[in-house]
């Protein structure tokens, strides 16, 4: 269990906090005999799913798989968003960013949660000025009385919700290398370990944005894994149809959420994602039990 003496800076991205110093996250992951679709069957079987992120709009990197789990399969989903996102930039006209960005992004996050019929826990750990996940995590911790207090807060919500599955960021890159994304991953994994009386399955997001040029010469944008050669990757095909929304596929929820989070995406960004080819419409994931801090393939990705 983490203690106040264990800082986020113990090892690369503070992963040791989440690993209990062992370098590997322990969860209820499958063994080596897991079938290709076994991990999806596990997600679809979940009654309760918890998603831990840093900011409003972070859920977009997981949106397609969450759409099928929460909307189609009927899982009870809960978003724990650690900040109001007030430290970012606003891409709306100035008048639309009033009274302040945190208020605007909070309202956007509420609408996004409604898409999934999800409970929203929108915290306010503060706008931190950080260049590393270590700094971000420690500033958050200082705002609530220390590392122990912060981990205990998240662990308490995990215990209350009792999720079958938890989704969060991979602390080694945080999808976009944002230090707060990476700190959120460390915190979620540490709290999951701390809260568990029985093992839970934890998945981390492995997507990074890839921008190509379409046939018309315009940009198209989608996802690809950070380390494609990682044999432990599980890849969700977001071209899967959503029966409750005739004529739509899971990828369309990414476009929908980007439109909701209008303060963070220009219309041209939405068009580029909507135009993504089938090969870019994916959600790569890893089981947390396959996240190894010392894996050289993931070293230095955010330098």
Image: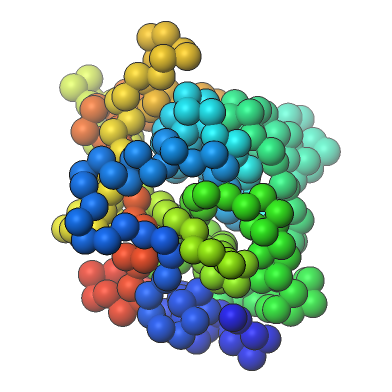
Kindly give the residue lying farthest to the bottom in the view shown.
5
Indicate how the structure is coloured in the image. Answer: rainbow
Kindly give the residue lying farthest to the front in the view shown.
198
Regarding residue 71, the answer to whether it shows in the image is yes
Kindly give the residue lying farthest to the top in the view shown.
246
Residue 14 placement, left or right of 287? right
Identify which residue is drawn at 21% across, 61% down.
32
Identify which residue is drawn at 50% across, 50% down.
165
Residue 30 placement, left or right of 14? left
Pick the quarter of the image with the C terminus. bottom left
Report the label total: 0
Looking at the picture, tell me which residue is in the foreground, 101 or 78.
Answer: 78
Instruction: Pinpoint residue 26: horizontal percent, then vertical percent.
Output: 42, 70
Looking at the picture, tell me which residue is in the foreground, 91 or 142.
Answer: 142
Residue 193 placement, left or right of 138? left
The quadrant holding residue 277 is: top left
Looking at the picture, tell me which residue is in the foreground, 254 or 1.
Answer: 1
Residue 260 placement, left or right of 143? left
Regarding residue 92, the answer to whether it shows in the image is no
Identify which residue is drawn at 24% across, 75% down.
296
Identify which residue is drawn at 32% across, 24% down.
240
Instruction: Pinpoint residue 192: horizontal percent, then vertical percent.
Output: 56, 65
Instruction: Pinpoint residue 33: horizontal percent, then vertical percent.
Output: 20, 56
Does 168 sit above or below residue 295? above
Pick the quarter of the image with the N terminus. bottom right
Instruction: Pinpoint residue 181: horizontal percent, then vertical percent.
Output: 52, 59
């Amino acid at each position: 269990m983490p203690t106040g003496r264990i800082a986020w800076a113990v090892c690369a991205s503070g992963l040791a906090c989440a690993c209990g110093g062992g370098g590997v996250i322990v969860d209820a992951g499958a063994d080596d005999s897991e079938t290709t679709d076994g991990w999806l069957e596990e997600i679809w079987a979940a009654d309760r799913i918890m998603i831990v992120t840093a900011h409003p709009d972070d859920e977009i990197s997981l949106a397609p798989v969450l759409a099928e789990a929460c909307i189609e399969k009927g899982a009870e989903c809960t978003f724990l968003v650690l900040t109001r996102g007030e430290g970012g930039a606003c891409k709306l006209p100035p008048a639309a960013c009033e009274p302040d960005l945190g208020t605007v992004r909070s309202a956007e996050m509420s609408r996004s949660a409604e898409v999934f019929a999800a409970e929203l826990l929108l915290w306010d750990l503060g706008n931190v000025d950080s260049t590393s996940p270590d700094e971000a995590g420690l500033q958050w911790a200082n705002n609530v009385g220390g590392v122990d207090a912060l981990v205990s807060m998240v662990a308490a919500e995990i215990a209350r919700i009792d999720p079958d599955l938890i989704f969060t960021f991979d602390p080694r890159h945080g999808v976009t290398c944002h230090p707060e994304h990476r700190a959120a991953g460390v915190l979620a994994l540490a709290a999951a370990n701390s809260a568990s009386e029985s093992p839970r399955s934890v998945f981390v997001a492995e997507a990074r944005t890839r921008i190509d040029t379409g046939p018309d010469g315009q940009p198209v944008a989608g996802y690809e894994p950070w380390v494609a050669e990682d044999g432990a990757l599980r890849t969700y095909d977001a071209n899967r149809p959503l029966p409750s929304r005739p004529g739509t596929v899971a990828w369309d929820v990414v476009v929908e959420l980007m439109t909701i989070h209008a303060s963070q995406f220009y219309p041209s960004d939405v068009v580029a994602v909507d135009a993504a080819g089938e090969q870019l419409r994916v959600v790569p994931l890893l089981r947390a039990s396959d996240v190894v801090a010392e894996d050289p393939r993931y070293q230095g990705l955010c330098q």
